[in-house]
Image: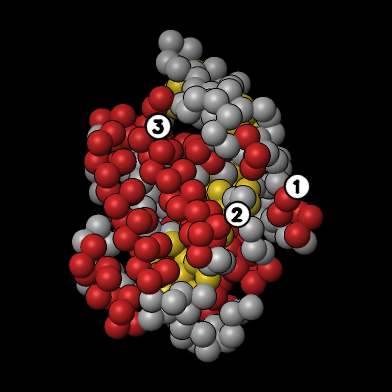
Amino acid sequence: MMEKNSKIYVAGHRGMVGSAIVRELERQGYTNIITRTHKELDLINQVAVEKFFEDEKPDYVFLAAAKVGGIIANQSALADFMYDNMVLEMNVIHSAWKNGCKKLEFLGSSCIYPRMAPQPMPESCLLTSELEKTNEAYALAKISGLKYCEFLNKQYGTDYISVMPTNLYGPNDNYHPTHSHVLPALIRRFHEAKEAGLESVTCWGDGSPLREFLYVDDLANLCVFLMNNYSGDETVNAGTGKELTIKELTELVAKVVGYDGEILWDISKPNGTPRKLLDVSKAEKLGWRYMTELEDGIRLSYEDFLNNPMRAER
């Protein structure tokens, strides 16, 4: 168990997940949280990372830093995504181990699971068949990180764990017009359509794919819970166990934003994977369950979007 004054390093504290973990730790009364901006510490620089860990010697590490992006970014920079993520996580995990870190938690992504994984996807389906080609580079890097944690546990008796979240949304999300994920992209589109008085908004595909969404503060709550209550080589899925169609999601976002124009579907555009649902029974057996329902979470996200100075960037 982490003590309230244990030295806790949150890597990636400015991102959506890292900032939520810092909020959750503070909410629970942890007082010794250390962070570094990218400018202060480039996690891809091995020498800099080794020096940071030698100087600071954190007791616990949440590794939420990553180079991320949507489908377009992933496909256009495969080599960069693989190199940057692999080097970053290896530097942090290795330096944590060398400097006596008591426990490390690695944040992955549900894209690590096979393209044709059984639905809902259990943790055990990892590496049972081939990956989705569009984000293979990112997935391979994330699999390497969680496997390195597992192998350190096996070879050196460390207590390093990993957690695999489903689609996330919430405060500090990325609302970039081309580099954002589906939910924040919809918030932005419907807001701009409402502002411009557009009669209709056209979305890709036919709206039939099923997706699951977890509010990022719920994930942060699980991350702290697992740090205190879970040890094991296998990863733990983080999700709600609930899914809805992209069409239902789109209508829900339009409702929350207050856009009442028509929603059209461009069926010449791809749908993506038909279904991606995580099996969350493992987290539930450990005693954890999500708290924020989707409509409430979208409302909180829209408030964040309206107060987000980055959203105006084209």
Say what amino acid the circle numbered 2 marks: Asp
Q: Earlier in the sequence, mark 3 or mark 2?
A: 3
Percent position of residue 241, x then y: 71, 43
Marking on residue 281: 1
Q: Distance of mark 3 from mark 1, alpha carbons?
A: 26 Å
Percent position of residue 168, x then y: 52, 48
Considering the image in quadrants, where does the C terminus appear?
Answer: top left
Marking on residue 179: none
Identify the image quadrant of residue 268.
top left
Relative to residue 13, is residue 258 drawn left or right?
Answer: right
Residue at 49% from the left image edge and 37% from the top image edge:
111
Neighbours of disc 2 within 10 Å: few (<14), some (14-19), many (20+): some
The reply to whether callout 3 and callout 2 are in contact (CB within 8 Å) is no
SS category of the residue bearing label 1? helix
Outermost residue, top side: 268
Say what amino acid the circle numbered 3 marks: Glu
Q: Distance of mark 2 from mark 1, alpha carbons?
A: 17 Å
Residue at 48% from the left image edge and 12% from the top image edge:
267
Between marks 2 and 1 in the image, the one whose residue lies nearer the viewer: 2
**Which residue in the structure is indicated by mark 3?**
136
Neighbours of disc 1 within 10 Å: few (<14), some (14-19), many (20+): some
**Which residue in the structure is indicated by mark 2?**
233
Question: Which of 99/210 is in front?
Answer: 99
Percent position of residue 51, x then y: 25, 75
Question: Which of 121/305 is in front?
Answer: 121
SS category of the residue bearing label 3? helix
Residue at 46% from the left image edge and 83% from the top image edge:
7
Q: Earlier in the sequence, mark 3 or mark 1?
A: 3
SS category of the residue bearing label 2? loop
Q: Distance of mark 3 from mark 2, alpha carbons?
A: 22 Å
